[in-house]
Amino acid sequence: MNILKISWPHITLLAALLVTFGLTENSQAETVGAGIAVLALPGANNTVDTPTDGTTDQSRQNIDISFTATLPAGEYIGTNWSYRAGQTGSVIPYIAFSTGAHTYEILAVGDQADIDSAGLDMDVTLPFGGSSFTLGAPTEIFGGIVNPTGAGSQNPIYTNLASGSFMDHDNNADGNLNPGIVGGAVDGLGHTDLPRSYAFSIDVAQVPEPSSAFAMIVVAGLAVLMMRRLAAK
């Protein structure tokens, strides 16, 4: 049986290949939203939104305006999102940018999470889903969550009322809760600069250029070939 031995010159050669094809450089990646850790802040006042009585619609719209990210021009995609729920319900994550004072346009919508009693008080990370989006210039992006509307709907995600950070927030009391639709507007929010944070976050990563993706395949192939030759010696 051959034992794979990699010498320092071989390591430096592989590193040089990676640098040559630009693979050691980090692509643009950011996280928006306060995240689950907001529930563990000193003096946390953790609770849930007003529960439904089974008939009333207690759905919510929440945009985190404290934990944002500014991305350079390029193509991006939501990769994962995380949350902790304190009551049952359904929730849809989204990524948006500002179009004015407390108004937004949705760039990407993730997959809906349907949370039952077995999913409460757990730290959950799921694939974001949805399609990629393109920014033509440096843009500040925001993470948001919205609930489907209807009798018995409620927001399941925990909130820390003493986080020291802020949200733009709306309920469906007027029947005009903005749905999570790519290109859709989020406006008419009933409570802006609301002092609280919700326990969710969304990871966003840059989509590699086609040339970079091809380079990754080439370098991976070279690395495998080099390892096989080393193993054969």
Image (cartoon, rainbow, N blue to C red):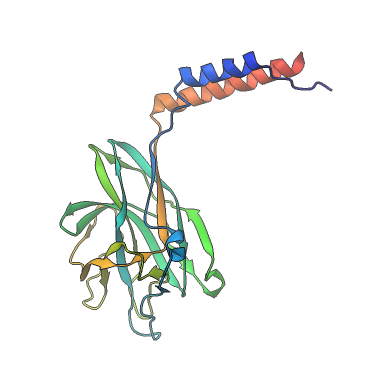
Q: Residue furthest left?
A: 100
- For residue 143, what is the image quadrant? bottom left
In this rendering, would 193 be left or right of 91?
left
Is residue 99 left or right of 16 when viewed as pictured? Answer: left
Say left or right for 104 vs 23.
Answer: left
Of 168 and 135, nearer the camera is: 168
Residue at 36% x, 43% y: name it.
132
Quarter placement of the N terminus: top right
Up-down relation of residue 168 to residue 95 (above or below): below
- Which quadrant of the figure contains the C terminus? top right
Q: Position of residue 58 (x, y in %)?
A: 33, 78
Of residues 96 and 14, the one drawn nearer to the viewer in this rendering = 14
How far across and down, in percent of the image, does residue 156 sit? Answer: 42, 71
- How many numbered discs sit on the rendered protein? 0
Percent across and percent down for residue 43 are: 41, 69
Is residue 75 depicted above or below 23 in this figure?
below
- Residue that protrudes farthest toward the front in the picture: 42
Residue ranking furthest to the right: 1
- The residue shown at (52%, 16%) is 16
